[in-house]
Amino acid sequence: MKIEAIDLFYVALPEITRTADGSQDSLVVRIRTDNGLEGWGECDASPLISMAAYVMPMSHSNVININEALIGETLDSPEDVIRLRNKAGEYGLDIQQLDHAVAGADIAMWDVLGKHLAEPVWKLIGHEASYRKLPYASVLFGDDPAETRKIADSIVGRDFRAAKFGWGPMGRGSLEDDIALVQAARDGLGFDAKLMVDAGVIWGDNVDAAYKRAVAFADLGVTWLEEPLRTEEVGAYKALSDRVRENGVKIGIAGGEGADFYRAADDMMTNAGLDFVQIDVGRIGGITESKRVADRAHELGIQYVNHTFKSHLSVASAIHVFAGYEEFDLTEYPVGESPLILGLTAPTGVFRDSNGLIAAPDTPGLGVEVNLDTLRQYQRQVKIEVDGEVLFESQEP
Amino acid sequence: MKIEAIDLFYVALPEITRTADGSQDSLVVRIRTDNGLEGWGECDASPLISMAAYVMPMSHSNVININEALIGETLDSPEDVIRLRNKAGEYGLDIQQLDHAVAGADIAMWDVLGKHLAEPVWKLIGHEASYRKLPYASVLFGDDPAETRKIADSIVGRDFRAAKFGWGPMGRGSLEDDIALVQAARDGLGFDAKLMVDAGVIWGDNVDAAYKRAVAFADLGVTWLEEPLRTEEVGAYKALSDRVRENGVKIGIAGGEGADFYRAADDMMTNAGLDFVQIDVGRIGGITESKRVADRAHELGIQYVNHTFKSHLSVASAIHVFAGYEEFDLTEYPVGESPLILGLTAPTGVFRDSNGLIAAPDTPGLGVEVNLDTLRQYQRQVKIEVDGEVLFESQEP
């Protein structure tokens, strides 16, 4: 089959708040083929900037847009998807936004190919099985310990056995403030639940500050301390993880969501001393590149975990990537209340089974479908013109 | 003073050809302050995508546009520029295009601050002197050895004592074809001229192919082999540079233009075994971040070289960055005929002295001025609307 069209949908809540909540908007990408099939993908990226990467005028042979690379191309096999993902990368060699933007198209190509070949994506990308994973509820800290406790209680009320709290006031007050936040989360979750902490790069390059939290949070049974430092501070990460290990502190160091391309993740895995590498399929350029990271993590003995804070289109994309690695047994699971994100794939989704676990679907493609009514309800109308020529204009889904 | 406005100008030749010639368009950024000053900067990036990064709607607290980060801010000292560059980075933590886009604003902030304080940029960023550098003419290979020879002859005719040939047919034929191209360049330049070869990432991860060229080109007195491998193949780079050194092959390995942010350059310097690190000030996020790389290269004993294929606005920005390091004595100097690029700063520019050397200007700011007539002549009219609201519309310079 051939790729006939790439449709872009910028969807957003009516009001966007200045919090670290990525579920307030989305760029949804649809690929249509000449045999009437459709595949869907989602970017975790600024929608408008990413849309420009699909339609902008050529600057030279290394700055050519994604539509030009993909539309009209043949798509019949996994090798075709990989070839086309690489082609888009070559056309956009000097486009920094390439990976964030092409992620949606890459995911949509895998989805539509799965529908075409009647296979789930996890099989197409080379896995032999789809193992179940323990989903952890991924939430933001409350503004104080009391509010954090309430959030933890609600997570227990929703039967989650694992949770990650992040951002909010973490690292913005004293060490004691930070401990009180994590203590509140632990108190709410109970002792048996897995608890992770996401520090949102708050300590920059300050290894001491991060180490003190690592020690304190380990005492509260925290599985990992995530992004204690800025992504680029790879040397500081290494110093921190070495110190944690040498002193027998029982906590993992996690990071990697800031990796926008394969080598950035490889750099973190090789040089930062990570125990957990967290990859966002909607940022690192899609399923193709995420799978490379998962394979490499497996080789290195580092646990691969998805980073996901968008809709179930992303939840599904993310879990297919590492479905076949039994040892990668945890998965980030967004539990926010954004009606946009909840509605985007409703009534389909990747839901917990009776044991509270989730697995990559066995149905063809990603195994979730996009709800066109939700797209219509939240769609933003975008129009981009250069010299009077309309390069992009939003269309009815 | 305060930043009052950021103006964006997308300029392009009427016809863009599919060659690796980055001098066909540009994004020029002007910063205006409340005391009537103006600073200018240039991005080496897709103009339309980068413009979107200045105006796109907020997605969440880590996806906020550059205008929001900078307009209204106080700019009175070098510390302010660094603070504002970091602020834009924090506002755009999850915007992949941030560095390519903010480069122009960062450069413009240094330029306007220099004018405000009546100091050249090289002094503001901490250099004690502005040493002269040997400019190498940076050109593309001809389609065959004969055409390459003609180009080399013309470079000699223009009194250059160093040249770099890149892209074109290099690596697309046999080893012998590649040698014939370089031989033609050498024949034209004569034995005394410095000759560099840019392979344009053509050998991917194939260390053997790159090594064979390194050996052959060393025999032709080539100073460095640039980007023989894809940027992300850091392990392959290391294998190549180790092999070159162990076998005493007299050629340097160069790379780094693909580094879109500080850590990517640091990764290449630390883990790829580079002899020369080549940084594009218009890609890596401006003068602030380039200077960090130059400082680090100095520490590591790696030679910093600019990568520049735009106007003299970029030539000037690039040379200020490493002006004070006497040992970094080579500078890439675009010599294309693009009237857009030649005209953008005419009649100002960074020109060769009677010894054929260039230096960062001693005049306030960058030391070059933008020609508004050229902007007008080549400006593309851009209009970006979301839900009927005009987020950007090109204006008269």
Image (cartoon, coloured by chain):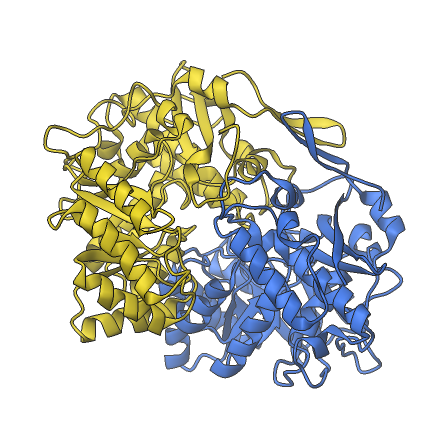
Chain colours: A yellow, B blue
Question: Residue A71's x, y, as percent?
Answer: 51, 27
- Residue A17 in the figure: left or right of residue A323: right
User: Observer-nearest residue: B305 or A352?
Assistant: A352
Q: Is residue A286 left or right of residue B380?
A: left
Residue A332 location, quadrant:
top left
Q: Nearer the viewer, residue A314 or A191?
A: A191
* Tally of numbered discs: 0
- From this view, report whether residue B5 is shown above or below residue B17: below
Q: Is A331 placed above or below A183 here?
A: above
Tell me where residue A263 appears, x and y as whole percent.
Answer: 39, 56
At 35% from the left and 51% from the top, the residue drawn is A144
Residue situated in front as seen by the camera: A397 or A157: A157
Q: Nearer the viewer, residue A205 or B213?
A: A205
* Residue B141 appears in the rendering: no
Q: Quadrant of residue B280?
A: bottom right
- Quadrant of the drawing holding the N terminus of chain B: bottom right
With B306 as the anchor, is B301 left or right in this view? Answer: left
Tell me where residue B273 appears, x and y as whole percent: 42, 73
Which percent across, then down, holds residue B4? 76, 53
From this viewpoint, is residue B319 visible? yes
Q: Residue at x 42, y 60 (%)?
A: A172
